[in-house]
Amino acid sequence: MDLPALRYLLLAHDFGLRFELLVILLVICFLVFWLTQNIFPSFLFGEDSQYAGYIYNAMGVVFSLVFAFVTVLVWQNYNGVSDAIAKEAGALNNVYRVLSAFPPEVERNGQAKLKTYVNTVIEEEWPLLSKDQFSVKAYKQLLEIEHLAIQIKPQNMGESNAHQQLLSLTLQATELRRSRIYNAHFSLAPPAWIGLISSLMVFLVFSCLFQMKSKRIHVLLIFFLSSTVVGILYFLVLFIHPFLGPMAIGPEPFINLLKLSWIY
């Protein structure tokens, strides 16, 4: 599911994202506040404010439970993708090392293909992940590495054992790459979004329906409530897409392969 509005918000920096979320919520709340206070005053809780307050407290608890559930889903997905990327880089590094068990021409060819593939992932594929896309070029280069591993003909028992390990590591790297590609999207399904946004809107709109002696105090309370909700929502939005926004996962594990692990 693509969410153009949320994708646009995530293009902002940390402070800008929080500011934009606050403005959106305040505009909605103050619009509802103005409509109910001036055009539809019959919808306000007057003498029944005390009883409405009990319901309001219960709504806060329910909203907290919904938000906690959604946050756990998003956080687990983000951590899972980050862990898979580290394992993918580790698998490629192991492939690079195992190639040293074969003749020099096979080792040089395989290691050169690995470096080319990792460079393509960093420079071409990683920017595409934020758009929920992947590099066909990188995929073809990975297939070449798989083909090379399959075509190796072991000459002795040591090479035979290394060949089995090489095939296993190559398949592992392929599966981890597939996991990275499949998780390059917003981590909440439409029903989860509908539940979260509807609960949030009901909770905030309900706060505008109380009839208070001072409208200035009422506006101030709505502002602080919206600011608090934004602080919580900001944390959720930061991790909603593993490759987009201020907390986007970068290709550092792959960069480290080229700059640290594979320079010797």
Image: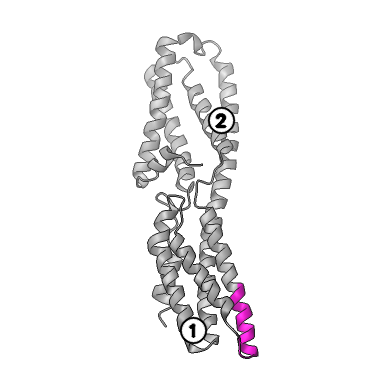
Q: Is residue 71 above or below residue 125?
A: above
Looking at this view, name the residue that lies furthest to the top.
42
What residue is shown at x 49% (from left), y 44% (from top)?
A: 236
Amino acid type, mark 1: Glu
Residue 157 visible somewhere in the drawing: yes
Q: Nearer the viewer, residue 243 or 68?
A: 243
Q: Nearer the viewer, residue 37 or 93?
A: 93
Q: Is residue 59 above or below residue 102?
A: above
- The magenta region covers 154-168
Which x, y percent locates residue 157? Answer: 65, 89
Is residue 167 a member of the stretch shown in magenta?
yes
Amino acid type, mark 2: Gly
Q: Which residue is mark 2?
A: 60
* Number of the label disc, if any, that sits on residue 162: none
Is residue 130 a member of the stretch shown in magenta?
no
Q: Which residue is mark 1?
A: 107
